[in-house]
Image: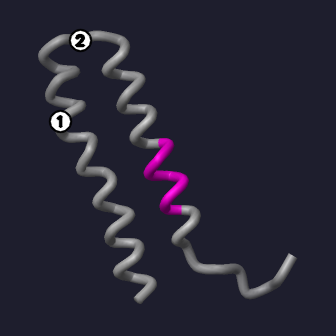
Amino acid sequence: MALRVRLVTLLALLGLAPVGYYLLGTGRTVVALSLVSILVIFGSLFLMTGDADAHPA
């Protein structure tokens, strides 16, 4: 089950493809910021869906 959740999280990286294509076409800074935004979303989802620590805080 946890592997499926992680796989869905990795699908967030598919958002990089159209943004990267548009960035190559225009070269605008705003598009580069969109890439950073997608990476932040992916990182957040990846951490949230990760395995829980064995030791409680």
Question: Residue 18: where, in percent of width, then height?
Answer: 17, 36
Which type of secondary structure does the marked residue at label 1 adopt? helix
| Mark in front: 2 vs 1 | 1
Q: CA distance from mark 2 to mark 1?
A: 13 Å
Q: Does 10 sit above or below residue 30?
A: below
Query: In the rendered structure, which disc, 2 or 1, sits on the residue that comes first in sequence?
Result: 1
Residue at 83% in and 82% down: 56
Question: Residue 39: where, in percent of width, then height?
Answer: 43, 42
Question: Residue 19: where, in percent of width, then height?
Answer: 23, 31
Which type of secondary structure does the marked residue at label 2 adopt? loop
Is 2 included in the stretch rendered in magenta? Answer: no
Q: Which mark is residue 18?
A: 1
**Amino acid tagged 1:** Pro
Residue at 55% in and 72% down: 50
Residue at 57% in and 65% down: 48
Mark 2 residue crowding within 10 angstroms, few (<14) / some (14–19) / many (20+): few
Question: Residue 11: where, in percent of width, then height?
Answer: 28, 60
Residue at 80% in and 84% down: 55
Is 43 included in the stretch rendered in magenta? Answer: yes
| Count of picture labels | 2
Quarter the C terminus occupies: bottom right
Q: Nearer the viewer, residue 27 or 37?
A: 37
**Amino acid tagged 2:** Gly
Q: Nearer the viewer, residue 24 or 38?
A: 38
Label 2 sits on residue: 27
Q: Is residue 47 left or right of residue 6?
A: right
The stretch of residues the image draws in magenta is: 40-46
